Amino acid sequence: MAIIISTVNMKGGVGKTTLTVNLAASLVKNHKKRVLVVDLDAQISATLSLMPPQEFAKLRKEKRTISSLINNQIKPSEKNLDINDVLKSYVCNLNGLDLLPGDIELYDEYLVSEMLHNKALEENNIKFEEVWSEFERVLVKNILEPVLDQYDFIIMDCAPGYNLTTRSGIAASDFYLLPSRPEPLSVIGIQLLQRRIKQLRENHKKNHPLTIELLGIVFILSGNTLLGTYYKQVMKRVQNDFKPSELFQQKIPMDINVSKALDTFSPVVLSHPASAGARAFLKLTEEVLEKVQQTESAKKLENASVDLKTLE
């Protein structure tokens, strides 16, 4: 089954998409993993980092974006699509790298509210908040369900802020990655997100406890020597708030090639593999794999211990 990772921060402009697409491409190219990138952000940055606008426009016209799948969850029809009908394979001509394209209009908030209101009435006047909470929990999960056994990793680029798709993406994930710049507002975004996830866990702990864990905080574009002292001061604040195991050692430096890669609609690890940015992402990918393996091994040991106690 795929390991699902959300890349998320309450603040935009912190390198979420850059982290998502380069981690995904590196996992495929350098570690032979099968990876699906899911674009949950209406800014469609992940989509346009992996394909030209003309290609996206064609997919959108054919209704081959995540919006069609979300609409099917809101208002099912006889001609329901599933994720296999919408996936874009061989992204960047890389076998094993697939994309679930995003959309500039992900869903209609009015239709969501109307559908959930009617459902609450139909189910013996169950509280609207409970219906909303359940829909939030299963929306993205149901979309991904048919392909969970086709990938090693599913990496979701979540929208900044805390909208429905971001909450649902988090709820469906095994881990979340927190990209950050060593700047005060970016650090505040970390703090806000941690509070939101704590509340999300609280909302679901009664019926469906969430198992999502923080994989780690990644500092993006943190190598500007002119601001080095200030950067270190800000990073120190984060280091004081989190355990060493929750912070990635590898940081992504300033590198113009990371931005240039956007002109090729390809991650820097593919377009400029010898650049400093690409090399940093390769090392970060190794660290991600190590952290995932350690966490999964710990879970197996814990489950085995629980099973043993049950037998006793």
Image (spheres, rainbow, N blue to C red):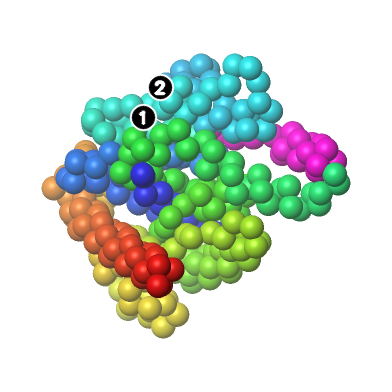
Please rate how many residues cluster around mark 1, counting C-alpha atoms within 10 Å: few if below 14, some from 14 to 19, many from 20. Answer: some
Residue pictured at 34% horizontal, 65% vertical: 304
Q: Can residue 280 be seen in this snapshot? A: no
Q: Which residue is label 2 attached to?
A: 55
Question: In this picture, which residue range is highlighted in magenta?
Answer: 103-123
Residue 228, image x, y percentages: 30, 73
Residue 193, image x, y percentages: 54, 64
Inspect the image, locate mark 1, and give the three-letter code of the amino acid beneath it.
Met
Report the front residue among 92 and 15.
92
Q: Are marks 1 and 2 in contact (CB under 8 Å)?
A: yes
Q: Considering the image in quadrants, where does the N terminus appear?
A: top left
Q: Main secondary structure of the magenta part?
A: helix
| Cα gap from disc 1 to disc 2, whole angstroms | 6 Å
Q: Is residue 221 above or below residue 158?
A: below
Inspect the image, locate mark 2, and give the three-letter code of the amino acid beneath it.
Glu
Please rate how many residues cluster around mark 2, counting C-alpha atoms within 10 Å: few if below 14, some from 14 to 19, many from 20. Answer: few
Residue 308, image x, y percentages: 37, 69
Residue 112: give its label: none
Report the front residue among 13 and 196.
196
Residue 51: give its label: 1
Asked if residue 7 lies in the magenta stretch, the reply is no
Asked if residue 108 lies in the magenta stretch, the reply is yes
Residue pictured at 32% horizontal, 67% vertical: 301
